[in-house]
Every structure is written in structure tokens, then in C-alpha cells.
Image (cartoon, rainbow, N blue to C red):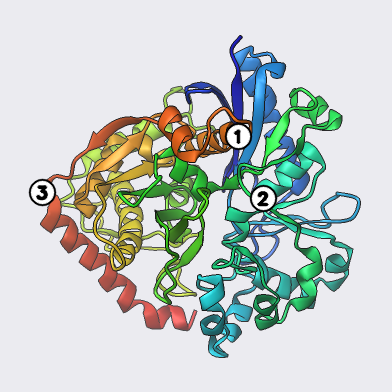
Amino acid sequence: MSRYLLGIDNGGTVSKAALFTLDGNEVATAGRKIATLEPKPGHAERDADGLWRSTAEAIREVLAKSGVNPCDILCVACAGHGNGLYLIGDDGRPVRNGIYSTDSRALDYVARWRAAGVGERALPKTAQCLWPGQPNALLAWLRDHEPEILARARWALMCKDYIRFRLTSEVCAELTDMSGTSLMNVVTAGYDDSVLELFGIADMKRLLPPLVKSADLCGKVTAQAAAETGLAAGTPVAGGLFDIDACGLAAGMVDERLMTLVAGTWGCNLYVAREPLIDKDLFMTSCYAISGWHLMLEGSPTSAGNLEWFIAEFLGDGTGKLPAQGRSVYDLCTELVASADARDSRLVFLPFLYGSNAHTAAKSCLIGLEGRHNRAHVLRAVYEGIVFAHHWHVRRLLQFRPPPDAIRFTGGAARSNLWVQMFADCFQIPVEIPAGTELGALGAAIAAAVACGCHADYPQAVKAMTRVARRQAPDPTMKDLYAAKYARYLEVIHALENVWGKW
């Protein structure tokens, strides 16, 4: 009898579910778009009930596509975007919309904390910089602006912890996710009252759920969740993990040899090491899924979400297909970008539609347009701008470690050979593409495999369940060209600093 593992992944734009064999082969996948709500400028929210419905629908579709008996699924695990905030009450109902990690409503709180030196004092324990999409800042904002809603809240959850709660009715917070929130002590891997006191939110301790690890068993699918998803009631559910950890595992990252790049709404660039790196010039250090290891991250919401916006506004019909043609809009993008010579295109696109790694008030823009330019030139600039945003983060990481043997590339952009080659040529580091289409869900399934005893530990599970599909080496003849383009990109950012300061 065949047995299976189900991985669930809720990122910035899609709820995904994927079914895997015990050796990591993808059996079936499904996804549902998640609507982002913007009730006010700087607010990024999502209907928490709608998020659960989209997840349940994706699970039902996977089961229908695969024809697998739900009783043959050994374990389920969830991955999801980090930070943001999902609040539920004593009755298990959401007390308000979930808040996504690109939300910037709490920007003033972060600015005040920085000015008062709070970030510096917290850094030795939190191991990360401050930014407005983290729950420490969001809780402070809610206390002052929505006190009646906060009073109804019983638990503060991360995205995947909320989905796991809907599956099991059990409340817990998983370590990899919570260690990226500035709500706990990364060095001790536990809650720390002094951290909450530094941010003036000591009274929020009542909202923090018990901590579990990614491969802990954290309940079973309830009868109600079974009815909504098609899963078998009683199926074990693992703790799950932060989506960057999930992508790291799916990319085969179990030691220092590799780095991983995730190109989604957020552009995440990461590596792991046993010792936590605590430095004011590093975006974040968190606890990795492998016990005793830490994950060092440089990232910002400056990645492929910018391309998704361009496609939604200027190409296609919102379904990923071109109207009346039935062909993929992404294939059209590849053709257009390939038709614009990299040496001829001097346009600069700043991929700051959803946030920036350059200035807190920075906005996206396109610089250098002339009448001769067409949408192919603009698309190439979008592709290159996203590459350069990742390059900025990778260069920061390489301050702290030697260049890796290779960078493992995950996210939708990995499906474009042309775009991956641009990354390799800019970095001048080989780029490897892991096998599979849903790497976040695969990472979740790896956690499920360890939780239910299919594999003894993460290194064994990663060895059994992951593979490299292809490797793209950098073209040394493109090194100087991309170095010049990147320098121009930085010049534009620098030139606009005074403009953003007055925005």
C-alpha cells in the first residue's frame, strides 16, 4: 500500500497544497489565489476565513486530482509566510482580518523605537532588525488604534499556525516562525519578558501560544476540518514551519555549503549555520528547523510580486493565460525579455511596489524611458530590477561568509531559464534549481515525514526527498555588464533619497 504526505503552503498570493510520496515525488498540486485587502494606504490584510476556505479548496482539489484515499496520508504539515498577525478569540474565531507581512501601518512605531535605541538594545536577544510588518509593531499599533478588538483577542498566531489551528483546533506557535517575529529570544529559543518590555508590550504576553517545534505532532484533523477539506479525520498534523525554512529544506540546505534564494512576494536570501549571527547590518537571524542550527536571512518585499503586478495590470486576463490565445502569459514575458538586448536596455526599475530595502519611504519607479522603448524593454527592466534587489541582499550576506558552492533557487521565477540565467550572471555564482514545482509545500512535507517517523531526522529526510533538476552556470562575459547595470541601479536609488524623504 502506498503512503503519502501532504504539504500546505500559504505565501503572499496563493494558498497551495501538494501531495508527495515518501521519497518526495510530487503526486498532485493545487492552488487558490488569495485576495489582498488594502482598506487604507499602507494596510495589507486578508480575510482569515477566506484564507482557510482557499486552503481547504486547494486540499480538496489535490485529493480529487490524485485519486488518493485520504486514509493513506500519513501526516500533514503547513508552511506559511512569516510575520504579519492573525488574531483569534476564545471561541477560535478571527477577531479581525489577518494582517500580511508587507503591512506598513506601524512604521511610526518602528521609527520611534529606532530613534530611542530600542532596536540596538533588543538586538542581542531578537537577532533581527525592526520593521513594521512584524507582530511586535502591529500589536503596539492595535493597542492604540483598535483596543476593543485587541481586548477580544486570545491568541496571536502566524499564518501557518492559524491554518494548523483550523485543521486541529489546537493552539500552538511553532519555533521557526516565532523566532522571526521579534517577540522572543532567538539565542535561548524561548519567550523572554525583557524583549516584550523593551517594546512596551509586556501585557501582550497573554496572547503568545505555547511553543512547539516544526516536527512535533500538534494535533489531528478534526471532523469539521475533514468535512471541509476531504482529509480523513484523525490524520496527524505536524508543527510545520516558516516558509523560508521550508524552502531551505526543499532546496537541500542542511549545512553551510549552499545558500537559498526564494523569489516570491518577498525576496528572501538565506544560509544556515550552527552559531547565530547577531549584527546590526543583518536583516534577521532565526531558529532553523534543524535543531541546533540558525537561519540567516536578508530579504525584503522586492521580488517577483512586482512582476505579478505588472502582468495583472498590463498583460493577460488575470488567469495566467493570454486572452483568446490560451497560452501562458509567462511564456510571453520570456519572449519579450529575450527580445530586448541586455546591452541595449538602460532602463532602471526599482521593485519597491510593496516595500523597499533602500529607504523606508521609497516607492517603485521606472527611470530612463524614451520614445523608442517598448514593453519588452520595460519587462527586461522589471526582471533586472528584481535581480538587483536580490543581489543587494546577497552581497550583504557575503560580508559574513564565503561565497557558496551554489545558490539553490526556489519560487515561481525558478521556472524561467532566462531569468535564472540573469541571476547567475549578476551574482557570478552557479544557480541550481531543485526538482518540483511547489518547494514550500515540499518543505512542509519533509517536516511531516520527520514528525510521523517516515525519516529519522531532517538530514535523512532531505537526502531522500530532494533532488536538483538543473544547474545554470554564470556567463563570465556578462560580469562587467551586470556590474555596470547594478551600479546604475544603486545610483538611481541614491539620487532619489531626498525625494522620498519629502514624499
Residue 241 in view (yes/no): yes
Say above or below: 92 vs 2: below
Q: Quadrant of residue 183?
A: bottom right
Q: What is the CA distance from the residue labelled 2 to the residue labelled 3?
A: 42 Å
Assign a secondary structure to mark 1: helix
Q: Position of residue 133 (x, y in %)?
A: 60, 65
Q: Nearer the viewer, mark 3 or mark 1?
A: 1
Looking at the rendering, in which quadrant would you find the N terminus?
top right
Amino acid type, mark 3: Pro
Assign a secondary structure to mark 2: helix
**Would you say the residues marked 2 and 3 are in contact, meaning their CB atoms lie under 8 Å apart?**
no
Q: What is the CA distance from the residue labelled 3 to the residue labelled 1?
A: 41 Å
Q: Which residue is mark 2?
A: 159
Q: Which residue is mark 1?
A: 448
Q: Which residue is mark 3?
A: 476
Q: Residue furthest left?
A: 477
- Local crowd size for mark 2, using a 10 Å CA cut-off: few (<14), some (14–19), many (≥20): many
Residue 311 in view (yes/no): no
* Mark sitting earlier along the chain (3/1): 1
Name the residue located 63 percent from the left edge and 80 percent from the top edge: 109
Q: Quadrant of residue 235?
A: top right
Q: Residue furthest top?
A: 1
**Would you say the residues marked 2 and 1 are in contact, meaning their CB atoms lie under 8 Å apart?**
no
Amino acid type, mark 2: Cys
Q: Quadrant of residue 269?
A: bottom left
